[in-house]
Amino acid sequence: WERTRRDVAVTTIAPQVTNKLVVVYQMSP
């Protein structure tokens, strides 16, 4: 169950990290 819980956490956090990277990439000249 630990593994499943971890996968759920990664699935939830990953989009937020990706959004931050996209914002930084768009802000850079």
Image: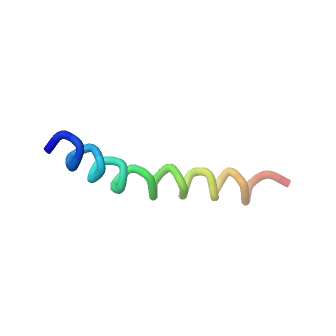
- Image coordinates of residue 20 in percent, x first then y, are 56, 51
In the orientation shown, which residue stands out farthest toward the left? Answer: 1
Q: Nearer the viewer, residue 17 or 1?
A: 1
- Image quadrant holding the C terminus, namely bottom right
Q: Name which residue lies at 50% across and 49% down.
A: 17
Q: How many marks?
A: 0
Residue at the top extreme?
2
Q: Quadrant of residue 18?
A: bottom right
Position of 6 compared to 27: left or right? left
Choose top left, top right, bottom left or bottom right for residue 26. bottom right
The image position of residue 5, as x and y in percent, is 20, 46
Extreme residue in the right direction = 29
Q: How is the image coloured?
A: rainbow
Identify which residue is drawn at 30% across, 50% down. 7
Q: Which residue is at a point 62% across and 51% down the rendered structure image?
A: 21
* Residue 14 as seen in the image, left or right of residue 28: left
To which quarter of the image does residue 6 belong? top left
Quadrant housing the N terminus: top left
Please state the horizontal and vertical placement of residue 27, each as a whole percent of the image.
74, 55
Q: Give the residue drawn at x 44%, y 52%.
A: 14
